[in-house]
Amino acid sequence: MTELTKGCSPHIADPAAIQLSLLQVHPRDNVLVVLQPLASGQALIDPWQEVQAKDDIQPGHKVALQLIKKGEAVIKYGYPIGVAQQDIPAGSWVHSHNLKTLLSDQIEYQYQGCEAEDFTFPTELPTHFMGYRRANGRVGTRNELWIVNTVGCVNRAAMKIAEKANQQFAGLTDGVFAYTHPFGCSQLGDDLNHTRAVLAGLMQNPNAGAVLVLGLGCENNQLAALLKACPELDQSRLRSFNAQQVEDELEQGLEAVAELVQLMQQDKRTECPVSDLVVGMKCGGSDGLSGLTANPLVGRMADLVCAAGGKVVLTETPEMFGAEQVLMSRAVNKTVFSDIVSLVNDFKQYFIDNNQPVYENPSPGNKAGGLTTLEEKSLGAIQKGGSAKVTQVIPYGALVQQQGLTLLQGPGNDAVSSTALAASGATLLLFTTGRGTPLGFPVPTVKISSNSDLAKRKPQWIDFDAGALLQQGQNAQDFSYQFFRELIDIASGKNTKNELSDNKEIAIWKNGVTL
């Protein structure tokens, strides 16, 4: 595999300099990204007007800027995203038919120090939001009552309790929500531990002002063991029981909710520093513009939150493959570097153990949007982590503890990885998308479109249009500051589209046997 340049983060061109139809992301690139449909025979814009398009090429896809000979690297973001399978003449469409991945199995990495720089938080931006300070010092952006079930057998009971509670106690909290799942029974070992760890993480999320845990009684995921896995849970804000041990679980559940709602009346929003924010970063349904607009914008938010002393969490380990050395160059010390190496190699081994190639990605939707190889997708995906120092690596289901950028073990699946971010303690999720999705999760899920067409077609899904970065004359700093202020409003109580549509769910990583 070709080595990445030490210490460099992928470069994103200033939108103020973006041409209307083509973009060279980095000066080293030998491909351009098409921003408007390019017709065969059409000359490229200045300064590439000597090149003529040889194919019809759709927005988000790549056109060769020069002859790329068979076996030569195709460069985007300043890094190789694969190798030419055949000679690719200048002006040709570059995609799966003539570009292949360079990814391989586990490789050796060498620690060469931390190349990341510290940032100063801009004085013109807000330094506080209105949040809910919990007894353990953590701060929530919502004051909700969450119902968590130990096992799928009581899903319907949990949902009925939530439905009746929202009718009976409307307006007294930010809502009562049941986060159901099909697991907890017939699971063993690490598979059971994953389920328990994620549920415990959700129960300890500060957006839950109170928690009702509903068990059955005979499941592998025993209620007592789940509660023991929650050391940061405020016991005064917890109620729990097994349905097999009460006469009427709906009646018992509503009585427990009534007690908790009464306690939650004490909770008020107070002014909290941005350093109390925990922000999870996620992308789903990416297209060829995701790594140029939405992901870099979210990366700027990561840098701002980290500069303010807050916590940022980046997951989707497979979407680090091919770009992992960029993250390794930002490890705050050798221990964190070694943890990143283990994170990447262990996940590659997970693929290998299941007889799957490590490069089985991007998805069909990604490819339709212009992404060809996993290296290309990963170099765009890690933009969400900005340029901050990586201070911690945590396993799936663990709580984030360190300020700065944390890498969280997890798959790329949208629902599974987003749930893992909420379970790690994230109180806001920034979710970028180029294809669109209605998915939402337990904490406010801010949907950021990579292109303006999606924002116009799906206003009920999209909270912020990062595609506007491509408008001529747009200033990148002003645009990112505008988005940061929007996030402060959301953290302070402004509803996201997923909240308005009541689109909130969880998914748990199932990676073991079922009895």
Image (spheres, rainbow, N blue to C red):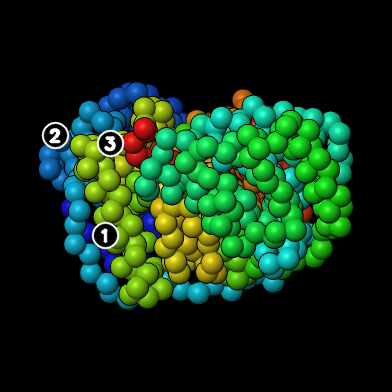
Along the polypeptide, which appears first: circle 2 or circle 3?
A: 2
Mark 3 neighbour density, 10 Å: few (under 14) some (14–19) many (20 or more): few
Query: Taking 21 as reference, is 38 above or below it?
Result: above
Residue 360 is marked as: 3
Along the polypeptide, which appears first: circle 2 or circle 1?
A: 1
Comparing marks 2 and 1, which lies closer to the viewer? 1
Query: Taking 352 as reference, is 200 above or below it?
Result: below
Residue 515 position in % (x across, y down):
36, 32
509 displayed left or right of 361:
right
The reply to whether discs 2 and 1 touch (Cβ–Cβ < 8 Å) is no
Along the polypeptide, which appears first: circle 3 or circle 1?
A: 1
* CA distance separating discs 3 and 1: 21 Å
Mark 2 neighbour density, 10 Å: few (under 14) some (14–19) many (20 or more): some
Instruction: State the residue position of label 2.
Output: 86
The reply to whether discs 2 and 3 touch (Cβ–Cβ < 8 Å) is no
- In this view, the residue in front, 296 or 314, is 314
* CA distance separating discs 2 and 1: 23 Å
Quadrant in the rendering for residue 129:
bottom right
What is the count of numbered marks?
3
316 displayed left or right of 206:
left
Q: Amino acid at mark 2?
A: Gln
Element class at badge 3: loop
Observer able to see residue 317: yes
Element class at badge 2: loop
Residue 363 position in % (x across, y down):
36, 31
Observer able to see residue 504: no
344 displayed left or right of 483:
left
Instruction: State the residue position of label 1.
Output: 4
